[in-house]
């Protein structure tokens, strides 16, 4: 490693990289004032973090726990003594110590899967732009299914689509798929409303004609699309409610889906940025939020139902071929994930990029970064679709069911 590369790799006790190499291969130093501001926001990690944080390991390695029992994520108990067996299941598990304490054990493959002798070609598709004659002004999951079926007939092995993550259910709709309010749930603007209505035997023909007319506009009008789709979907939900399998699916998602649906209902009433809401509503665990959810149970159920419909349509659209979804680097600071994970994010900081040959002023991507030590202390719960693991300990973010 060269001296410049070594300097660029330096990090301070807060985990901040203090040097970087610019587009001209010149070493740069982060100004001390910026470092100090970041350190104050991040704050110092607890001295006992290594003793309480989950252990990350892989099969065939010794996590240093000795003889213990492990409650596996998908059920069952495994007893280990030293090295993890090669057949030990991957996932987020819980170690039961003799004194009753519980600690996380995260078992990963240790490396990314590398295809051996596997080659395939496929398309990159901006789904919103892949609209058909049957679309309501924007490409939808039925269009994705059509693309997938056609691609299979000519030998494609995959489709790569833009991020499909949810934005705030208000107007104006966020245009960029790279600044969602969540990376866990999806955007109902991509639902094929005709299919949802047909399955429920609800007539939305009038709205469908208005949606089809939006295809004549050369520019995608997300606000007009969402206005029509929301009205149609609301009619279907009001007429038919949940549907077979809905309750079971909701139970499988855990509390995170409920939190997201509550945020959506709150955003419709209070605006898309939780930081501008009344103070009691800014805390997802407050009594005010619980009362709001109870008083707006139908709205919460509607946003939950939308995610169920999205899950069903995406499964059908991607059946039989690998469909890859691009992933945004972060989420909007006023959105649902930032509301739910306030303790894990660095407020008043935005992810971006330094100046380069194409963006001489640098880039501000608008997403708050995760704080590494808080993320570790929480048991990496940001990756959990369900509720927090039972050994997560960040204040206000313990186990919920």
Image (tube, rainbow, N blue to C red):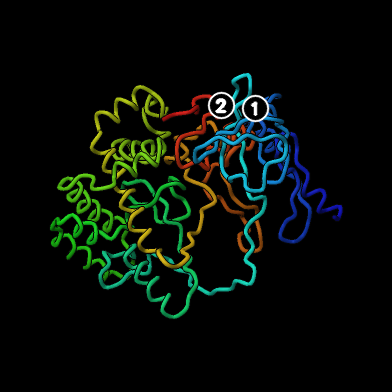
Nearest to the observer: residue 114 or residue 255:
114
Q: Quadrant of residue 125?
A: bottom left
Location of residue 101 with respect to 38 vertically, above or below: above
Question: Image height check: is 234 above or below 374?
Answer: below
Query: N-terminal of the two: label 2 or label 1?
Result: 1
Identify whether 9 is placed above or below 77. Answer: below
Q: Pick the residue in front: 92 or 378.
A: 92
- Quarter of the figure with the C terminus: top left
Q: Position of residue 367 (x, y in %)?
A: 52, 45
Q: Residue at x 15, y 47 (%)?
A: 239
Label 2: few (<14), some (14–19) or many (≥20) C-alpha neighbours in 10 Å: some
Residue at the disc numbered 1: 52
Q: Residues within 10 Å of mark 1 (few under 14, many from 20)?
A: some
Q: Secondary structure at mark 1?
A: helix
Residue at x-position 72% and y-position 36%: 82
> Left or right: 235 with respect to 268?
left
Toward the viewer: 248 or 265? Answer: 248
In the figure, residue 356 lies in which quadrant?
A: bottom right
Question: In the shown orientation, is residue 2 left or right of residue 293?
Answer: right
Q: Quadrant of residue 274?
A: top left
**Residue drawn at 28 percent across, 69 percent down:** 217
Q: CA distance from mark 2 to mark 1?
A: 9 Å
Residue 205 spot, x, y in % from top left: 14, 62
Q: Which residue is mark 2?
A: 393
Residue 259 placement (x, y as % from top left):
38, 36
Q: Helix, strand, or loop for circle 2?
A: loop
Q: Quadrant of the N terminus?
A: bottom right
Residue 387 image point, x, y percent: 45, 35
Label pair 2/1, CB-CB below 8 angstroms:
yes
In the displayed structure, does residue 279 sit left or right of residue 375?
Answer: left
Residue lying farthest to the top in this orientation: 99
């Amino acid at each position: 490693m060269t001296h410049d590369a070594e300097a660029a790799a330096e990090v301070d006790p807060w985990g901040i990289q203090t040097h970087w190499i610019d587009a001209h291969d010149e070493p740069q130093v982060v100004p001390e004032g910026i470092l100090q501001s970041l350190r104050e926001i991040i704050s110092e990690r607890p001295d006992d973090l290594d003793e309480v944080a989950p252990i990350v390991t892989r099969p065939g390695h010794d996590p240093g726990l000795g003889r213990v029992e492990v409650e596996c994520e998908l059920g069952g108990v495994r007893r280990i003594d030293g090295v993890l067996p090669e057949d030990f299941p991957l996932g987020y598990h819980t170690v039961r110590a003799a004194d009753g304490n519980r600690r996380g054990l995260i078992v990963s493959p240790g490396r990314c899967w590398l295809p051996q002798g596997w080659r395939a070609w496929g398309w990159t598709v901006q789904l919103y732009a892949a609209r058909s004659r049957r679309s309501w002004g924007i490409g939808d999951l039925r269009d994705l299914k059509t693309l997938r079926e056609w691609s299979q007939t000519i030998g494609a092995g995959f489709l790569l689509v833009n991020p499909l993550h949810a934005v705030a259910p208000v107007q104006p709709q966020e245009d960029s798929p790279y600044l969602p309010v969540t990376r866990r749930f999806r955007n109902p603007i991509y639902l094929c409303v005709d299919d949802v209505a047909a399955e429920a035997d609800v007539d939305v023909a009038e709205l469908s004609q208005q949606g089809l007319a939006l295809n004549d506009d050369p520019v995608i009008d997300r606000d007009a699309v969402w206005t029509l789709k929301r009205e149609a979907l609301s009619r279907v939900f009001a007429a038919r409610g949940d549907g077979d399998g809905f309750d079971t699916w909701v139970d499988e998602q855990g509390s995170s889906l409920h939190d997201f649906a509550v945020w959506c209902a709150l955003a419709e009433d209070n605006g898309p940025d939780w930081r501008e809401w009344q103070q009691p509503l800014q805390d997802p665990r407050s009594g005010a939020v619980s009362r709001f959810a109870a008083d707006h149970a139908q709205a919460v159920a509607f946003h939950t139902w939308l995610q169920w419909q999205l899950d069903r349509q995406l499964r059908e659209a991607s059946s039989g071929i690998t469909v890859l979804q691009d992933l945004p680097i972060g989420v909007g600071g006023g959105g649902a994930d930032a509301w739910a994970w306030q303790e894990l994010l660095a407020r008043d900081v935005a992810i971006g990029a330094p100046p380069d040959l194409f963006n001489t002023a640098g880039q501000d991507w608008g997403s708050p970064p995760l704080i590494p030590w808080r993320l570790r202390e929480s048991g990496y719960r940001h990756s959990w679709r369900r509720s927090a693991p039972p050994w997560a300990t960040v204040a206000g973010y313990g186990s919920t069911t």
